[in-house]
Amino acid sequence: MGSVIKGRQMAEIEGPFVVFIIGVRINKWMAVHRWLPVMRSMGPMLSELYANKSLGFLDASYFISGRGLSIVQYWRSYEQLEHYARGGANHLKAWQDFNRKASVGEAVGIYHETYTVEAGAYESIYVNMPPFGLGKAGQLKPVTSGRETSRERMRPDHEDR
């Protein structure tokens, strides 16, 4: 992760984009042979995506919970996300492995949520943070006069956007 940027920043990204949240939940801790391969499958997929930015993947952030791992991904378009899900070599293999092995029983769960975001229909604030989340997937800009509150940053007609 990059250096801390002092002060208040907001994210900016041109055009519409997609937020994709994917995660793994460990339901039975003792069934390591069921959930560990699922957790390990995420690394090769993300490596493939970071190495091939032309696929439409912009960036990802990881979050560990008491029972699993969630990854928030940013994509340029839903079509590019769907294309990767259906044809990405590492994703297809991981999905086939999950269906063959881990879906037997209930030791591990997986989920995903997909959100399409229209241009300008978002807001963010980062205070004394390195580039993170949407600010890392897009770009960071200093918070300026007229963009100090969440409501002001949500105004899509503002000339700064």
Image (cartoon, rainbow, N blue to C red):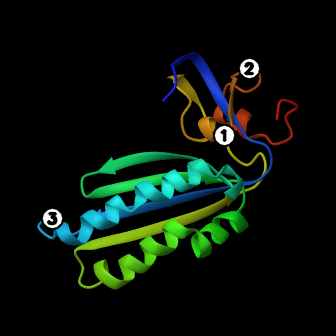
Report how far apart the C-alphas of labels 3 and 2 lie in the structure: 48 Å
**Front residue of 147 and 50:** 50
Q: Which residue is mark 3?
A: 29
Position of 111 relative to 117 (above/below)? below
Identify the secondary structure beneath mark 3: loop
Position of 149 relative to 23 (above/below)? above
Residue at 72%, 60% in the rendered image: 77
Sooner in the amino-acid sequence: mark 3 or mark 2: 3
Identify the secondary structure beneath mark 1: loop
The disc labelled 3 sits on which kind of residue? Trp
Q: Position of residue 46 (x, y in %)?
A: 50, 53
**Front residue of 43 and 144:** 43
Residue at 78%, 40% in the rendered image: 155
Q: Which mark is residue 123?
A: 1
Q: Residues within 10 Å of mark 2 (few under 14, many from 20)?
A: few
Residue 109 picture quarter: bottom left
Q: Residues within 10 Å of mark 1 (few under 14, many from 20)?
A: some
Q: Which residue is mark 2?
A: 144
Q: Position of residue 73 (x, y in %)?
A: 55, 53
- Quadrant that contains the C terminus: top right
CB under 8 Å between discs 3 and 2: no
Report how far apart the C-alphas of labels 2 and 1 lie in the structure: 13 Å
Q: Is residue 128 left or right of residue 125?
A: left
Position of 76 relative to 114 (above/below)? above
CB under 8 Å between discs 1 and 3: no
The disc labelled 1 sits on which kind of residue? Glu
